[in-house]
Image (cartoon, rainbow, N blue to C red):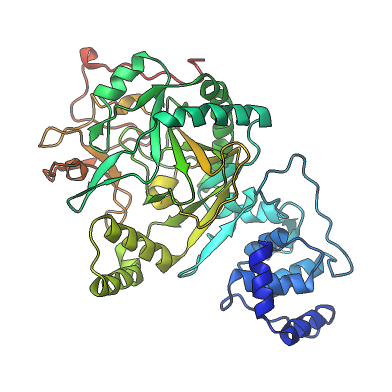
């Protein structure tokens, strides 16, 4: 951050910065409100000139909490007795994470409309969603801001350092056996831009996952049994995820109740995808995770190890609210007609630019929990990076473990088959306002190399707890074996 702020500060004239600085001590001279016109780094440069003793990352935190208004941020800091001659006191943190920002949210007091005073972290819970701006990426670092403005919770320094390093070393060795999965886009076969492998709890489950469960319309051959270190951290992941899920329901969800279709049961991971991003160019584009075996409103625990990368999220808007994105994509396609994955990538980028996106930085040993509303209402990606800071153990590589809970009621023996005999996949309607939020079973064969879709479609029905309502109830002899919980299999 020091570099980009320095660059912007050099671009600002000395006279303008001097005038702004001089106004800090004069309450009758207003500070320019740049909330709607300047980029974040220019705003940070202005705040730095006013409050040079406050760290840049802390000023960013305050700026985000004030919806990008320099005037509001400056007034808030000044009201707390902060000035260039009075350094702001912030609580020291123990064992700070590399690349993690300590938020000031729990230290700054704010005044509500009714005159009551509360901490910023408490007021963030009740704040309206943050409006990202067209063509911009808002970078969030602190756990309080990430929880307030996205459907995610982040825990820095999740594992003891030695345990995190041991798990990283073990999975780096495992990554030699990872592979790239293939899928079909616009009649072209493309490969995933990173390598991956599926991990299950027991040797007995290998047979199920290679002959019954389908991923992207095909059976996975690259299935491995959970490693010792992977097992050893699973209980901690399970406990931490359930703890933050309960907190989010109590503090943020309407009336302190779970979402409709969200399971009331304890989250119990019984499968995990382990991904390896080898170098800054390896990535994954905007997507929502497959709901077929997870069911509605699933929760995913994602543990990051190794080099830090950006996790970007954006809301899914109905098509009538995405006119700008469609116009951008159409005009660009007329100038440079794309094909295959290039077209899909350009459209995704256009949509992200049209509404803006939020970037969450994932340092080594951080656990990100994607809450129940994530897959239906947001899309996420790992963005390519121009440069990255090497990790002392993994170098340029990032290892990511996404723990998942496959529901017993959505075993592939129960889910519908489409007209061509393939397993149907479960999706959530997102684009049309009239059907937004409904679930559907669809044929996926059109994305499988060498196959064509039979256009099978069927609305999916679930009870309030997310259990499927089948027209044909499975008989006792059809009962599928349950997958073992990672923690229970230790």
Q: Is residue 484 left or right of residue 47?
A: left
Left or right? Give the position of 328 relative to 307. left
Up the image or down, 105 lies above or below 82; here it is above
Tell me: residue 402, above or below residue 106.
above
Front in this rendered view, residue 60 or 115: 60
Q: Quadrant of residue 149 in the image? A: bottom right
Which residue is at a point 70% across and 53% down the rendered structure image? 103
Q: Is residue 449 visible?
A: yes
Residue displayed at 27% across by 41% down: 182
Residue 157 falls in image quadrant: top right
Q: Is residue 335 left or right of residue 363?
A: left
Task: Say which residue appears at 77% left-offset and 54% top-offset.
Answer: 107
Q: How many marks?
A: 0
Q: Is residue 38 above or below residue 214?
A: below
Tell me where residue 337 appears, x and y as whole percent.
23, 68
Residue 432 x %, y %: 27, 58
Residue 69 visible to an observer of this rendering? no
Q: Quadrant of the N terminus?
A: bottom right
Residue that extends furthest to the right in the rendered view of this protein = 85
Q: Position of residue 417 (x, y in %)?
A: 16, 32
* Depth check, front residue: 265 or 289: 289
Q: Position of residue 203 (x, y in %)?
A: 38, 14
């Amino acid at each position: 951050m020091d570099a980009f702020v320095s660059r912007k500060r050099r671009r600002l004239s000395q006279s303008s910065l001097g005038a702004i600085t001089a106004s800090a001590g004069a309450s009758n001279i207003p500070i320019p409100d740049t909330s709607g016109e300047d980029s974040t780094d220019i705003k940070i440069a202005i705040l730095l000139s006013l409050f040079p003793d406050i760290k840049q990352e802390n000023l960013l935190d305050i700026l985000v909490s004030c919806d990008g208004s320099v005037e509001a941020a400056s007034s808030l800091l000044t009201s707390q007795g902060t000035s260039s001659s009075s350094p702001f006191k912030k609580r020291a943190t123990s064992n700070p994470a590399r690349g993690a920002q300590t938020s000031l949210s729990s230290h700054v007091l704010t005044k509500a409309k009714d005159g009551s005073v509360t901490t910023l972290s408490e007021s963030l819970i009740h704040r309206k969603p943050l409006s990202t701006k067209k063509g911009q990426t808002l970078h969030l670092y602190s756990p309080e801001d990430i929880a307030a403005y996205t459907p995610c919770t982040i825990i820095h320094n999740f594992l003891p350092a030695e345990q995190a390093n041991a798990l990283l070393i073990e999975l780096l060795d495992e990554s030699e056996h990872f592979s790239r999965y293939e899928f079909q886009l616009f009649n072209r076969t493309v490969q995933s831009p990173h390598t991956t492998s599926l991990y299950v709890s027991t040797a007995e489950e290998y047979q199920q996952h290679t002959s019954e469960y389908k991923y992207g319309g095909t059976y996975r051959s690259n299935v491995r049994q959970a490693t010792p270190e992977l097992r050893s951290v699973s209980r901690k992941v399970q406990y931490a995820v359930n703890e933050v899920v309960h907190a989010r329901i109590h503090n943020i969800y309407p009336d302190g109740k779970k979402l409709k279709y969200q399971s009331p049961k304890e989250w119990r991971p019984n499968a995990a995808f382990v991904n390896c991003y080898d170098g800054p160019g390896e990535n994954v584009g905007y997507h929502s995770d497959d709901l077929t075996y997870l069911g509605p409103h699933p929760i995913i625990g994602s543990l990051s190890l190794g080099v830090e990368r950006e996790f970007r999220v954006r809301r899914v808007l109905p098509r009538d609210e995405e006119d700008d994105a469609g116009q951008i994509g159409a005009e660009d396609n007329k100038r440079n007609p794309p094909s295959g994955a290039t077209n899909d990538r350009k459209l995704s980028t256009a949509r992200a630019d049209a509404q803006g996106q939020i970037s969450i930085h994932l340092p080594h040993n951080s656990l990100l929990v994607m809450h129940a509303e994530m897959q239906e209402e947001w899309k996420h990606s790992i963005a390519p990076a121009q440069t990255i800071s090497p990790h002392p153990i993994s170098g340029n590589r990032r290892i990511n473990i996404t723990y998942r809970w496959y529901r017993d009621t959505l075993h592939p023996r129960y889910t519908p088959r489409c007209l061509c005999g393939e397993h149907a996949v479960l999706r959530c309607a997102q684009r049309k306002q009239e059907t937004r939020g409904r679930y559907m079973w669809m044929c996926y064969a059109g994305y499988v190399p060498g196959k064509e879709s039979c256009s099978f479609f069927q609305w999916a029905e679930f009870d309030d707890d997310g259990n499927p309502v089948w027209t044909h109830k499975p008989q006792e002899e059809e009962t599928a074996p349950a997958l073992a919980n990672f923690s229970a299999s230790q």
